[in-house]
Image (cartoon, grey):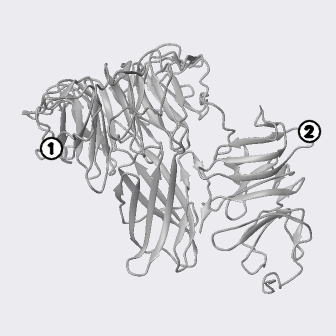
């Protein structure tokens, strides 16, 4: 039957409706040929309330100019993607496609990244995918300057999705560190001096497609020696450690902090710094910074191979590792409980025998409840922690062939107490050093290094393992790389960045950096539900080849702009985190933001945002947002 209560207050729209979509609060966004609603100007786009009246809080200004809105879709964070014939939105250039904020204003960050051209061109259809990407279809032949006949695939930030192409890449040197930033750009550190033929001393920022960022480090002379490690703070400032003694001509011994644009942050003053190489950096939730390396003092204070700094670069005297380790620390990882795993070349910690692996308490003292026995018989270069409600697991990789007397070639998994996890069996393991390792949300493990076989199967410098340690035969890297892989980073969408000494991968020229795209999708979804007994709860699920997380936070916003941390931490891990009980507002729009961090402590790894409107029934909101963008499908 016709709902006579809807739209009974007036004459409605003065032209054809070509597209509509319902928002989570029941409001309806419409696009089409019209120019007004009940005589109120609304050029080709409007929002109606549940009962069909004009929603005056949605203010698109002069709206879509130069043509109709043919298609639209709503992202779960409330933003609206529109496509059509138009060339402007509220007077600003927006060629056939635009994204609007929840209040109807233009999202200018999206607008500048895309353009559609072609004969008699327009967008006729669009859809937002569960992983936030956008497909568009219509009458066009070029998108963003690239040939795209009538269909194109756009990333959540508005960029055309192309293969990662570093061009000539890094002409000399190698890569030691890769970190993905919140906006999807990629920081790379190493001992190189140029990228794509442009001077870039030991650090460079790349866009998602592999091109060099011209706004990062402009005019800076960079670091005078190798950068070994990079971490990104919550405020987007960048910590670097390595061999260098100067950055942009200013003395900075082995550690420095940069502003977002790559300039030196002079507010971070480490004094005389470290007297030896800094090979590892970890950001703690309280803003303090753990460093490991071959140093024996920091700013004149004795610190043998491990230290903790305050946010201003000074030594944190509350962290006291005693006599420290007797040889360099080459790997660091942080547990959700604040305890710190260290690996390296050492055989003792504060005078106690610990062969190449140990765990410290939050204050720097040795955690004697973690007992690895005789440990490994060689160096540990990588540590990752998989958090679980049942039992945390610790993965070690490096240049050893045994753990506590049991054969384990270059990789081993431990239980939380330091004992060998016999359920993880890598067989013959790697035939040479594993230099870097990344844990995926689905439990699989990505490896890079000097090896050419794993469990006697050819795997040139890259391999993927199943959760039980067996070689993942569904991942076939072909010829692999022609030299060592020394750095890995997992993007939120599951693609994997590789860095190292190689100049080719899969037989294709790639100078020291490349990206691999898995066949599987990296999935994440945030679920909000109302429980009559416990109050409101939220669950964050993730799976596929995206990054594994071992610590999470939750924040609330009423406008999607200003966020308030909720005094609740996530519990769980291994693909699911639970938050609650919460006191979320009922019958009003709100936003939740979940953020995730991994044990490597290099900064934010994943993020999801959802717009909610709670009643008394259960609501589910699927695959929300990652650091590379926003957008997805909602199921109620």
Percent position of residue 291, x then y: 28, 35
Residue 286 visible to the viewer: yes
Q: Does residue 497 appear left or right of residue 421 in this picture?
A: right
Number of numbered discs overlaid on the protein picture: 2
Q: Pinpoint residue 75: horizontal percent, then vertical percent.
A: 64, 58
Q: Is residue 315 visible?
A: no
Cα distance in 3D space between marks 1 and 2:
68 Å
Element at badge 2? loop
Residue located at (34% from left, 34% from top) = 470
| Quarter-of-image position of residue 115 | top right
**Which circle's residue, 1 or 2, is located before the other in the chain?**
2
Looking at the image, which residue sits at the far top? 172
Q: Is residue 565 above or below residue 403?
A: below
Q: Residues within 10 Å of mark 1 (few under 14, many from 20)?
A: some
Kindly identify which numbered label has been placed on residue 370. Answer: 1
Nearer the observer, 326 or 92? 326
Relative to 167, is 238 on the left or the right? Answer: left
Q: Nearer the viewer, residue 390 or 238?
A: 390
In the rendered image of this protein, does residue 595 appear above or below residue 328? below
Q: Quadrant of the C terminus?
A: bottom right
The spot of residue 49 in percent (x, y) is: 73, 76
Q: Quadrant of the N terminus?
A: bottom right
**Residue located beneath label 2 in the image:** 119
The residue at the point 61 percent across, 28 percent down is 211
Residue 404 relative to residue 381: left or right = left
């Amino acid at each position: 039957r016709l709902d006579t209560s809807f739209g009974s207050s007036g004459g409605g729209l003065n032209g054809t409706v070509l597209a509509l979509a319902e928002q989570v609060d029941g409001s309806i966004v419409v696009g089409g040929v019209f120019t007004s609603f009940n005589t109120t100007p609304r050029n080709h786009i409007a929002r109606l309330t549940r009962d069909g009246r004009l929603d005056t809080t949605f203010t698109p200004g002069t709206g879509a100019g130069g043509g109709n809105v043919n298609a639209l879709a709503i992202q779960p964070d409330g933003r609206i993607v529109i496509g059509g014939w138009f060339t402007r939105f509220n007077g600003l250039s927006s060629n056939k496609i635009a994204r609007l904020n929840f209040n109807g204003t233009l999202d200018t960050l999206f607008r500048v990244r895309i353009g559609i051209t072609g004969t008699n061109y327009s967008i006729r259809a669009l859809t937002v995918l569960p992983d936030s990407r956008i497909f568009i279809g219509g009458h066009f032949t070029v998108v963003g300057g690239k040939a795209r006949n009538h269909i194109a695939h756009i990333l959540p930030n508005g960029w055309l999705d192309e293969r990662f192409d570093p061009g000539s890449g890094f002409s000399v040197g190698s890569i030691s560190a890769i970190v993905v930033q919140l906006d999807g750009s990629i920081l790379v550190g190493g001992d190189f001096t140029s990228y794509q033929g442009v001077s870039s001393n030991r650090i460079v920022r790349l866009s998602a497609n592999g091109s060099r960022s011209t706004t990062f480090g402009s005019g800076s002379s960079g670091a005078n020696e190798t950068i070994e490690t990079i971490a990104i703070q919550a405020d987007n400032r960048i910590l670097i450690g390595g061999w260098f003694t100067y950055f942009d001509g200013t003395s900075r011994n082995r550690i420095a902090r940069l502003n977002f644009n790559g300039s030196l942050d002079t507010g971070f003053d480490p004094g005389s710094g470290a007297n030896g190489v800094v090979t590892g950096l970890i950001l703690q939730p309280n803003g303090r910074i753990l460093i490991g390396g071959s140093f024996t003092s920091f700013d004149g204070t004795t610190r043998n191979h491990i230290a903790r700094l305050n946010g201003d670069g000074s030594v944190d005297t509350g962290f006291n590792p005693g006599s420290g380790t007797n040889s360099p620390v080459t790997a660091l990882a942080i547990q959700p409980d604040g305890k710190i795993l260290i690996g390296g070349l050492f055989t003792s910690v504060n005078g106690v025998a610990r062969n190449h692996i140990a765990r410290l308490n939050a204050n720097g003292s040795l955690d004697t409840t973690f007992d690895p026995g005789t440990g490994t018989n060689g160096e540990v270069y990588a540590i990752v922690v998989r958090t679980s409600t049942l039992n945390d697991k610790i993965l070690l990789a490096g240049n050893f062939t045994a753990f506590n007397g049991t054969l384990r070639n270059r990789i081993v998994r431990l239980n939380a107490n330091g004992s060998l996890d016999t359920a993880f069996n890598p067989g013959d393991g790697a035939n040479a050093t594993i230099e870097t390792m990344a844990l995926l949300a689905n439990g699989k493990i990505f490896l890079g290094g000097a090896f050419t076989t794993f469990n006697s199967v050819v795997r040139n410098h890259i391999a993927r393992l199943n959760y039980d340690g067996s070689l993942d035969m569904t991942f076939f890297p072909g010829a692999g790389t022609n030299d060592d892989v020394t750095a890995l980073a997992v993007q939120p969408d599951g693609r994997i960045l590789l860095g190292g000494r190689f100049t080719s991968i899969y037989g294709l020229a790639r100078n020291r950096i490349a990206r691999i795209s898995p066949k599987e999708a990296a999935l994440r979804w945030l679920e909000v539900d109302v429980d009559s007994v416990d109050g409101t709860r939220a669950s964050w699920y993730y799976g596929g080849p995206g990054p594994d997380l071992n610590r999470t936070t939750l924040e609330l916003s009423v406008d999607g702009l200003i966020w308030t941390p909720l005094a609740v931490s996530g519990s769980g891990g291994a693909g699911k985190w639970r938050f609650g009980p919460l006191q979320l507002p009922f019958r009003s729009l709100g936003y939740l933001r979940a953020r995730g961090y991994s044990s490597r402590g290099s900064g934010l790894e994943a993020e999801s945002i959802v717009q909610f409107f709670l009643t008394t029934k259960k609501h589910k909101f699927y695959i929300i947002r990652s650091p590379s963008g926003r957008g997805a499908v909602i199921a109620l």
